Amino acid sequence: MIEVTGLTKTFSDIRRGDVKALKNVSFSAKAGQIFGLLGPNGAGKTTCLRLLSTVLRPTAGHAEVAGFDVVKHPEQVRAHIGFMSGNTGVYDRMSAWEMVEYFGRLYGIPEKERIARQEEIFETLQMNDFRDILGAKMSTGMKQKVSIARTLIHDPPVLIFDEPTSGLDVLVARSVIDAIDRLREQGKCIIFSTHIMREVERLCDQVAVIDKGEILAAGTLDELRQQFQQPDVEELFYQLIANNRITEGADLHKETSS
């Protein structure tokens, strides 16, 4: 469902010149699978997801989503994905039901089908108790669920979640994680970006650890544990990031000295 080869994104910065936010990234994700993109803040996770969702255009490399090229066929890509960003806004003057309805209309879903779809989603995400509450009066958890609901309304085969439990309390975060787990059971291809280890252990079939725009390691958790001889996922993650930054610092020092 998702094939990424050599994906690179360079931004121009007045002070630093050209900055590579993503460097030759390659991976694939399949239907019925959750692919975890694991990295600290500023690692390149969000840049990668924005490239896959056609919000940004790659500088180099190639990516296909549901069989469509992200550069050549952006409209088809957008029709086949649901993208939930960690900072997605919610309209203050619309209720939860109205907001999801609005996005359903944008996707051109027939009314009867849309209403049935909304009822199913609101039941699954346990949103019926606040379906008529305005966005301005919603809690963080309510807003997060609305964001997920509007991501799902057109029933896309590919779902992209960028830090979906950010800022949520333990109970709401658990309900969100449970909902994502059920989506995998429905055969969805899911990209799941996070830096929370317990979510990775609970959900992810495959993971890629990314830092400074580069993938440092990829595979199942068992494969990574065996490869790096480290049974603790959090410690494994820390060691990969720390070693990468030590190496990068040493390389930078050599370049500066020369």
Image (cartoon, rainbow, N blue to C red):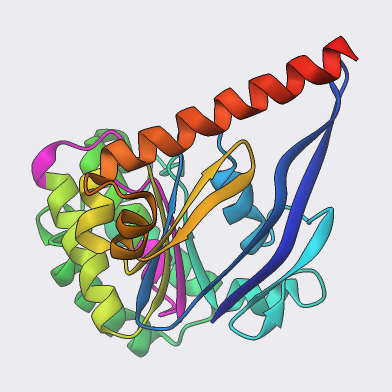
Of 120 and 56, which appears nearest the observer? Answer: 56
Of 187 and 73, which appears nearest the observer? Answer: 187
Q: Residue at x 68, y 20 (%)?
A: 250
Q: Residue at x 81, y 36 (%)?
A: 11
Please give left or right for residue 78 compared with residue 130 in the image. Answer: right
Q: Position of residue 174 (x, y in %)?
A: 13, 51
Question: Total of numbered circles in the picture?
Answer: 0
Residue 98 in view here = no
Q: Classify the position of the N terminus by image quarter.
A: bottom right
Q: Classify the position of the C terminus by image quarter.
A: top right
Of 129 and 240, which appears nearest the observer? Answer: 240
Res 64 → quadrant: bottom right
Residue 50 on the magenta segment: no
Give the farthest residue toward the top: 257
Q: Residue at x 73, y 52 (%)?
A: 56
Q: Position of residue 111 (x, y in %)?
A: 39, 84
Residue 165 on the magenta segment: yes
Q: Is residue 239 above or below residue 192?
A: above
Res 114 → quadrant: bottom left
Q: Is residue 239 above or below residue 22?
A: above
Q: Position of residue 48 (x, y in %)?
A: 62, 52
Q: Position of residue 159 (x, y in %)?
A: 44, 69
The stretch of residues the image draws in magenta is: 149-171
Please give left or right for residue 202 compared with residue 248 in the image. Answer: left
Q: Is residue 219 above or below residue 57?
A: below
Q: Is residue 206 above or below residue 140?
A: below
